[in-house]
Image (cartoon, grey):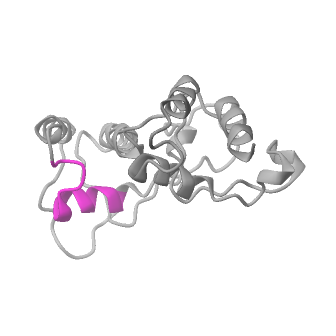
């Protein structure tokens, strides 16, 4: 019953079910979640469904139900790349088509209500500097069949593969 309630609630919250792995259902009636789900580790459960087939192994009807409400079996990695490249494109445009992001750069929220803000809400809080450092040092996002396309996307944005060390002027 708890799983069915999560399904119906998440399908109202997200058009594609994209649940961060650390997501915990917030408590409080103002958040719109049923009280019996408050503090539920939904992100961990979602990750277990994707990676270990928890609750769905040998249950095609359950898989079908999840797919009907927009569950993504590919996980958040592909969607994560889309957020990274989207934020990278905005940063590149704001910095003269050079993508040399400081390691500690986090996509900011608007200082207060503003009509024009370059960063969409879905990107607020994205640790873009860390993500791009991981691209350089660990090859994150650029391994596998999509790697060459993603490298080309970064290069088109002016990605600096070997930034100068030391303090940078901002």
Residue 138 on the magenta span: yes
For this rendering, which residue is in front, 82 or 78? 78
Q: Which residue of the protein is positioned furthest toward the top in this rendering?
A: 68
Quadrant in the rendering for residue 113? top right
Q: Main secondary structure of the magenta part?
A: helix
62 is higher (above) or lower (below) than 23: above
32 relative position to 52: left or right: right
Percent x, y of residue 88 = 32, 43
For this rendering, which residue is in front, 73 or 24? 73
Residue 65 on the magenta span: no
Q: Which residues are magenta?
A: 129-143
The residue located at (69%, 42%) in the rendering is 6
For the N terminus, which image quadrant?
A: top right
81 is higher (above) or lower (below) than 160: above
Percent x, y of residue 93 = 32, 37
Percent x, y of residue 58 = 45, 40
Percent x, y of residue 157 = 22, 38
For this rendering, which residue is in front, 78 or 137? 78
For the C terminus, which image quadrant?
A: bottom left
The residue located at (17%, 57%) in the rendering is 139
For this rendering, which residue is in front, 62 or 76? 62
The residue located at (23%, 55%) in the rendering is 140
């Amino acid at each position: 019953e708890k799983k069915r309630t999560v399904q119906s609630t998440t399908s109202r919250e997200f058009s594609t079910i994209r649940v961060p792995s650390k997501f915990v259902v917030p408590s409080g009636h103002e958040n719109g979640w049923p009280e019996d789900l408050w503090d539920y580790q939904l992100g961990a459960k979602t990750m277990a469904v994707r990676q270990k087939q928890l609750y769905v192994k040998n249950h095609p009807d359950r898989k079908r139900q999840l797919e009907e409400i927009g569950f993504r079996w590919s996980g958040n990695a592909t969607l994560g790349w889309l957020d990274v490249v989207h934020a990278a494109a905005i940063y590149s445009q704001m910095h003269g088509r050079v993508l040399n992001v400081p390691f500690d750069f986090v996509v900011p929220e608007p200082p207060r209500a503003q009509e024009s803000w370059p960063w969409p809400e879905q990107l607020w809080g994205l640790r873009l500097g860390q993500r791009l450092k991981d691209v350089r040092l660990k090859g994150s996002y650029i391994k596998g069949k999509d790697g060459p396309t993603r490298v080309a996307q970064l290069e088109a944005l002016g990605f600096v593969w070997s930034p100068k060390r030391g303090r940078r002027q901002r």
